[in-house]
Amino acid sequence: MVADVCFHDTLIDSASEVFETMMFMALEKISPEEAEMAEDTLLSSITFTGALEGCLAICCASQDAKLIAANMLGMEPEDDISMEDICDAMGEVSNMVLGSIKKRIADAVGEISVSIPCTVSGKMLDTSLGEKSNMTEEFVNLDGSLVKFQLFYKDN
Amino acid sequence: MAKSIMLVDDSATMRKIIMRTIRAAGLSLGDIQEAGDGGEALEKIGQTPVDIVLCDVNMPGMGGTEFVEKLRSDSSYDSTKVIMVSTESADDFISSVLALGANGYIKKPFTPESIQQTLEPFMS
Ligand SMILES: [Mg+2]
């Protein structure tokens, strides 16, 4: 049952798995009060349907997204990395984090199928999924970068 | 002779990561091709066959499952090894693509060790 899942832990554990395994980056949870998002952000989102329906959104400052992309690509943050590559890298992060969430909730919730990720950049980006959806939000410090994870979901 | 390889993934970042990880694992490679989905992969393999395909599952256009099915329906590619690389980790799903003719499976996120362990038997 959906009620059996602690989405906060699931979100943090899944994000940790991806960042530690693929990027050797440690992640530290921070309280929402301490978290002040930058104005220029990059938002990567990926939707899912099935036993549970919703969307995972990952948002961070554009310069921090570049840092994450550099880490994934084995490059230096001051290297020239195109916006296309940064968006692609962030999309793949959301794809892997959702994959990890999917694995962790499969027994309690059931199977979900996952879309192709989409990443956009802009000012003060936000996501929502209608009134009847639930939302779990976590802020983390990722080697000095602030990253916001949001999981929107509706029970089907 | 070093094996030729094709990386099929809609994410260019992921293709680069896989490539870097293979090199870091000390596996030596021959020619390398890349494709963004199953359709492009089939087209390129039709022109230049490869020994090993590392293939994502979730891609726009032709996904990994359909790619394996199509490749295996043509006996001229019987010797081509296909290893899936995916965030999909359900045992039932993995069994189903292996039954379709994939030769191995790597779960994302992966470690250099998991890439090495899965790929090594096909490299010699
Ligand atoms: Mg993909």
Image (cartoon, coloured by chain):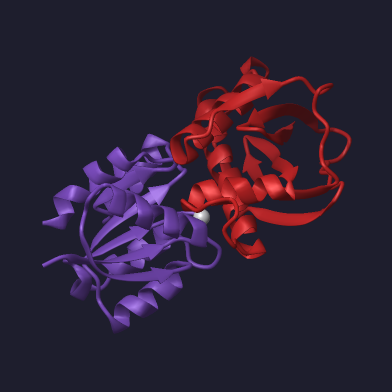
Q: Residue A123: x and y, percent?
A: 86, 51
Residue B24 seen in the current view: yes
Q: Nearer the viewer, residue A67 or A102?
A: A67
In percent of the image, x 80 and y 28: which residue is there?
A: A35
Vertical order, A147 against B124 (above or below): above
Q: Quadrant of residue B56?
A: bottom left
Q: Quadrant of the C terminus of chain B?
A: bottom left
In percent of the image, x 82 and y 42: which residue is there?
A: A38
Vertical order, A31 against B66 (above or below): above
Does residue A8 appear to the left or right of B61 in the view shown? right
Q: For chain B, what colour was chosen?
A: purple
Does residue B105 appear to the left or right of A91 in the view shown? left
Q: For chain A, what colour was chosen?
A: red
Q: Residue A32: x and y, percent?
A: 80, 23
Q: Nearer the viewer, residue B16 or A145?
A: A145
In percent of the image, x 43 and y 53: which residue is there?
A: B17
Q: Quadrant of residue A86?
A: bottom right
Q: Quadrant of residue A3?
A: top right
Vertical order, A16 against B10 (above or below): above
In percent of the image, x 31 and y 76: which residue is there?
A: B45
Vertical order, A87 against B40 (above or below): above
Q: Nearer the viewer, residue B79 or A89?
A: A89
**Residue furthest bottom as drawn:** B47
Q: Residue A94: x and y, percent?
A: 61, 44
Q: Quadrant of the N terminus of chain B?
A: bottom left
Does residue A121 appear to the left or right of B95 in the view shown? right
